[in-house]
Image (cartoon, helix red, strand yellow):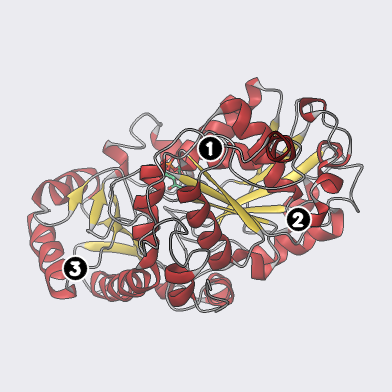
Amino acid sequence: MPTKSKNPETIVLHAGYRCDPATTAVAVPIYQTTSYQFHSPEHAANLFALRELGNIYTRIMNPTQAVLEERVAALEGGAAALALSSGQAASLFAVQNICHAGDNFVSSTDLYGGTWNLFQNTLKTMGIEVRFVDPSDPENFRRATDSRTRCYYAETLPNPKLNVFPIAEVAAIGRELGVPLIMDNTAAPVICKPLQHGAAIVMHSTTKYIGGHGTSIGGIIVDGGNFDWEKHADRFPMLNQPDPSYHGAVWTQAVKPLGPIAYIIKARVTLLRDVGAAMSPFNAFMFIQGLETLPLRMRAHCENATKVAAWLARHPKVERVIHPSLQTGELRRRADACLRGGYGALVGMELKGGREAGRKFIAALQMFYHVANIGDARSLAIHPATTTHSQLSPEEQLATGVSEGYVRLSIGIEHIDDILADLAQALDAA
Ligand code: PLP
């Protein structure tokens, strides 16, 4: 029997799978197949009509993906999940599933740059308007909402500012107005459960901590199953009116017997069917391997990051350190309200010597990798002013929280003495 445990350490190893029914294999097999033999013409017809859930074609579902989906859904406390080819695909699908041309959604300004671009430019070409608001005042979300607003979108622990998003406050405003909150929880798996704070949908770039070893690109969306789409039928015609792309299915009705999964089923059988951003079975297997040790790794990542932040805060060449463990006042209250068991493993620092010091520091690192990634088991560093943010003007860089001497660290799970030793020698050179 797969586990009924509520403990993350057990869920990631046991939820959704005991052994392979055909071979009794204990490790989840890589079901490297495109298609599945139907038992009978009736069976095939039932699957296509969604009278029964089952495998049809790997663009839409696959048994290896299914275990990953069940485990991440259980970890987040949601009803069901959908694995996709990248975090970007997950962000796009999460919004596009309920926003059509002419609609709008309200997003926090504190976002990963790729998500910003997707929302500001690509969704605009599809006729979907993003309204960016400053999350420091949750009421900004209410002010930007109108009758065509379909969702709110934010990141739990957005870098570079690392100000934890006011999940409960914005989710409560959304529930009052009938607007679901979608949370990108990529930087805070295990330590934050956005659904418990009122979010309706959670997404991850599995590329980061869930994979954890820097091997594969992937994404996942979790349907909280906790949003009443029928109650707000005027706001969500796409879930409450016949869908011409699926022989007139009304999603809130069609899958009711299967649970509160209207949102995620629609994403799977319409968007994924049509767009085809499927996660490969091999990558799903890699993410399952990562997921199995995720709670253990997150603990080690967070412990190391808190020690690094405290150490950097005392260093004479460091102007400022950014990590929730060092925050005070309202920011710390929010961090403590949302995060359990650690403050995340991203650490920002500003070097007194500015741009040149940032460049020299990165060049001198010996163990840290200089890469445009986060969430690897290895420690990583980047100097945004000369890389990820180099296309922006100095004013734009500052607006996004990136100063000339700012360095982003993604603290890994190596021994803390080795992490500090590498930082120390690189700071000496900066
Ligand atoms: N969300 C966050 C917070 C990210 O950091 C990233 C990637 O850096 C993404 C989404 C996009 O994920 P992917 O690179 O898997 O498409």
Residue farthest front in this picture: 40
Q: Where is residue 247 in the image (x, y as percent from the top left)?
A: 82, 28
| Disc 2 to disc 1: CB gap under 8 Å | no
Three-letter amino acid code of the residue under disc 1:
Tyr
Mark 3, secondary structure of its residue: loop
Q: Can residue 156 be seen in this view?
A: no
Q: Which amino acid does label 2 sit on?
A: Leu
Q: How crowded is mark 1: few (under 14 residues within 10 Å), some or many (20 or more)?
A: few
- In the image, which disc is placed on residue 36? 1
Between 111 and 414, the residue placed more toward the observer is 414
Circle 3 residue: 414
How far across and down, in percent of the image, does residue 280 sit?
42, 39
Q: Earlier in the sequence, mark 2 or mark 1?
A: 1
What is the CA distance from the residue labelled 3 to the residue labelled 2?
44 Å
Residue type beneath disc 3: Glu
Left or right, 415 with reference to 159: left
Q: Is residue 132 left or right of residue 375?
A: right
The x, y position of residue 378, in whole percent, is 22, 58
Q: Residue 258 carries which label?
A: 2
Observer-side mark, 2 or 1, equals 1
Q: Residues within 10 Å of mark 2 (few under 14, many from 20)?
A: few
Residue shown at 83%/37% (left/top)? 148
